[in-house]
Image (tube, grey):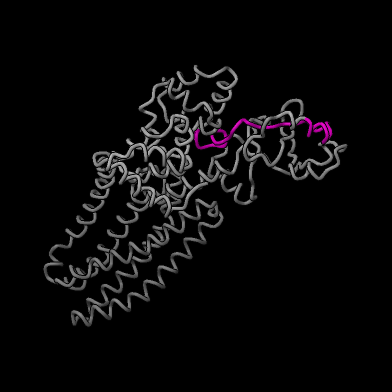
Amino acid sequence: MAQTTESIKSQVEILSEALDSGQFKQVARILNTGLSPSDIAHLLESTPPRERSLLWKLVDKELEGEVLQYLSDDIRAYFLSKLNAQELASVTEDFDLDDLVDLLQQLPDTVIGEVLNSMDTQDRMRVEEVLSYQEDTAGGLMNTDTITVRPDISIDVVLRYLRRHRSLPPMTDSLLIVNRRDEFIGVLPLTTMLVSSTSATVREVMDTEIEPIPVNMPDTEVAMIFERRDLVSAPVVNEQGKLVGRITIDDVVDVIREDADHSLMSMAGLDEDEDTFAPIGKTTKRRAVWLGINLITAFIASAVIGLFEHTIEKVVALAVLMPIVASMGGIAGSQALTLVIRGMALGQISGSNIRWLINREFLVGLLNGLLWAVVVAAAAIVWFNDIYIGIIIAAALVINLIAAAIAGTALPIILKAQNIDPALAGGVILTTVTDVVGFMAFLGLATIVYG
């Protein structure tokens, strides 16, 4: 049984102390008899690199394959790199097809070939079929372990057919109905079959209103369909309408989690599979790239400030108040940006409602700008005893909040149209826009007023 987060935390502490004291037998016993494969994987992900390598060596060979299925891509790739093709084939022998394909997609082509050659013909053909589809599509997500029946047989025949199986594929809630050309025509829910007369035919009780999922549908759309229809599994068909596999809810949950991780991590310029305990060199290299991009945008904002150097020298208050304008714009823009990215992920935004959304954000930016302009202007006038500085910062705030709201709404849509990830690039571009507009409005107005 999977353990709670608190329990895992205590296990980490216990195992860490045992490793430090060299009690490897105790550690191996806890790992291999006291924890499930998913808990072992969580434990490995919660451990720094040195201890992680030691723990992996203590995991029983029979458990390695199951543990690998639950590891994040980054950590799994590290352990896979230590195995040769024969060891890989042995470890993945009991993998479900979809999990095996996910693992193989992380390996070099030469290693994939060696692993495929070690399989029997039937298994190799099934794996190659799924590998032929893009990883982030229904085809890359599906499993080919389907149970199909014809519509013209009786329920009694179906039941006798099922009893010949030693077990049913995981997450089997329905049998899939196909004709003699293997074209999908409907499903037979197990619950319906069990309460139907054994003399009835499949055609009489099957559900033909279920829409199959096209094999090339993006996995994010698959996840939305599962959410809307409360599905446990769904059939997948090719362009000719022939059944090629099925997708189950456990794989869809992985997609939802990966998408959530991607959105969160991308805003910081990180990969969704970023290892919390990755080595210093690796972490530094990954973050340095994004810091460099942000540095370029910071220079752009600084160049705008430099254009008004003489004005700032005359009125020192401008230097004190500049961060307020940029900060307020940044927050307002981030609110709109996050809302739109979320709406796009949920499939709520389309060409028919973009104009309404932009108009709404314009008015929200205007109203918030006017509200906080009054507050900030009053504070600035009291602080510096200068009514002009209050008017200048009030006007700049209104301008920047409107620009931020419009930019935050439009940027994700524009980036998506250019096939650029809005979660990855939206934040840094938005920051540049709000900084440049804010500084330009504030210092430009000050230059006009103070000369």
Query: Vertically, is 184 above or below 292?
Result: above
Query: Taking 169 as reference, is 429 left or right?
Result: left
The quarter of the picture where residue 245 lies is top right
- Total numbered badges shown on the rendered structure: 0
Along the line of sight, which residue is nearer the eye, 314 or 263?
A: 263
Along the line of sight, which residue is nearer the eye, 163 or 21?
A: 21
Along the line of sight, which residue is nearer the eye, 130 or 192?
A: 192
Query: Vertically, is 183 above or below 39?
Result: above
What's the residue at 28%, 81% (across, down)? 378
Q: Which residues are magenta?
A: 135-160
The quarter of the picture where residue 450 lies is bottom left
Residue 384 image position (x, y, % from top left): 18, 79
Residue 224 image position (x, y, % from top left): 57, 48
Residue 418 image position (x, y, % from top left): 43, 43
Residue 295 covered by magenta stretch: no
Query: Taking 279 as reference, is 155 left or right?
Result: right
The quarter of the picture where residue 281 lies is top left
What's the residue at 43%, 65% (across, down)? 362
Q: Quadrant of the C terminus?
A: bottom left
Residue 159 covered by magenta stretch: yes
Residue 409 image position (x, y, % from top left): 43, 58
Query: Taking 139 as reference, is 179 left or right?
Result: right
What's the residue at 11%, 67% (across, down)? 313
Query: Vertically, is 118 above or below 400?
Result: above
**Which residue, as the protein is rendered here, is positioned at the far right?**
199
